[in-house]
Image: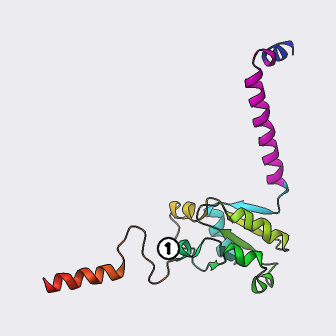
Amino acid sequence: MERIIEFVGNNAILSGIFAVVLIAWIIYEVSRLIRQWKEVDSLAAVHMINREDPIILDVSNSADYAKGHIHGALHMPPSKIESGNQQLLKHRERPLLIYCKNGQVSPQMANRLSRLGFTNVNVLTGGLTQWISDQQPVTRHKGAAKPGGKDKKKTRDEKKSRETS
C-alpha cells in the first residue's frame, strides 16, 4: 500500500488522468445499465426483424433515407418524434428498431421514445453504415442514385450524345 501512495505522489499527473478516465468509464457503464433501451448489432436486428416484427424507424435525414434504408423502415426524422407522432404512439407495446446513418442520432431518439412510453426500444449499433458493412440488404427509393453509380438522367444524356455523334 505504501508503494501505491508513493507512486501516486511521484506521478500526480498520470494518477489524475487515470482517476478521470476511471470515473468517466464508471459513469458510462452506470448510464448504460439504467437506460431504458438496448443496443443491438446487425445479427440481433435481423433476428428481431424475422421473429418479433418490430417497427423499424430510420431517423436519418431525407437524403440519407433516399440513398438507402432497411427494407420496411419508416422515415421518421427527429422533428416528427419530438412533436409526438400520433400514428406511432398507437403502437407503444410493439418493439422498435431505431437507426440512423452512423448511430449518432438514434440513441437520442431512443431516449425520447422511451420517455414517450415505448417499452421495447432497440438501437442498431453503428447505424446503417454498420448494417451495410455487415452485408445486410438495403432498399433504395426509385430515382435515388446509387452510391458511386451514375444517375439515370446522366446515362440517358450520354446515350443521346452517342447517337448524334
Q: Quadrant of residue 103?
A: bottom right
User: At 79% across and 69% down in the image, what residue appears?
Assistant: 112
Residue 87 seen in the current view: yes
Q: Position of residue 41 (x, y in %)?
A: 64, 60
In this picture, is 54 found above or below 111? below
For the C terminus, give its image quadrant: bottom left
Q: Please provide the residue range marked out in magenta.
A: 8-33
Q: Position of residue 67 (x, y in %)?
A: 50, 73
User: What residue would you read off at disc 1?
Assistant: 67
Residue 52 seen in the current view: no
Residue type at numbered disc 1: Lys
User: At 69% across and 65% down in the image, what residue appears?
Assistant: 106
Q: Quadrant of residue 86?
A: bottom right
In this picture, is 30 found above or below 53? above
Secondary element at image label 1: helix
Q: Quadrant of residue 7?
A: top right
160 lies left or right of 118: left
Q: Position of residue 108 (x, y in %)?
A: 74, 63
In this picture, is 28 found above or below 57? above
Q: Position of residue 125 (x, y in %)?
A: 65, 59
22 lies left or right of 98: right
Which residue in the rendered view is the most extreme toward the left? 165
The verdict on residue 16 being magenta is yes
Decide: few, some or many residues near mark 1? Use Cα within 10 Å; few <14, some 14-19, many ≥20: some
In this picture, is 10 found above or below 37? above
Predominant secondary structure in magenta?
helix
